[in-house]
Amino acid sequence: MIFIGIDQDQTKILLNLAGLIIPADQSGFLAGALPGQHHS
């Protein structure tokens, strides 16, 4: 599994975790759009 942390600065490098820092007005859209693009 791969995890994405919205508005989280990652100080430790983890292979399955990506931290994104984006403007507050765009984070809600991306939080819904990214899972919608992932198909198992």
Image: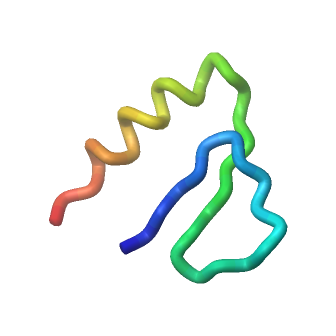
Residue 27 in the image, given as x and y percentages of width and height = 58, 29
**Left or right of 35, for residue 7:** right
Residue name at image x 72 percent, y 27 percent: 23
Specify the quadrant that holds the C terminus: bottom left
Q: Nearer the viewer, residue 23 or 6?
A: 6
Q: Residue furthest bottom?
A: 15
Residue 36 in the image, given as x and y percentages of width and height = 27, 43
Rendering colour mode: rainbow
Residue 18 in the image, given as x and y percentages of width and height = 61, 63
**Left or right of 33, for residue 24:** right
Compared with residue 39, is residue 25 higher up or lower down, i.e. above or below? above
Specify the quadrant that holds the N terminus: bottom left
The number of numbered discs placed on residues in the rendered structure image is 0
Q: Nearer the viewer, residue 35 or 11?
A: 11
Q: Nearer the viewer, residue 12 or 27?
A: 12
Q: Residue furthest front?
A: 12
Compared with residue 17, is residue 14 higher up or lower down, i.e. above or below? below
Residue name at image x 67 percent, y 56 percent: 19
**Left or right of 9, for residue 7:** left
Compared with residue 28, is residue 4 higher up or lower down, i.e. above or below? below
Q: Quadrant of residue 7?
A: top right
Residue 20 in the image, given as x and y percentages of width and height = 67, 49
**Left or right of 25, for residue 28:** left
Compared with residue 33, is residue 40 higher up or lower down, i.e. above or below? below
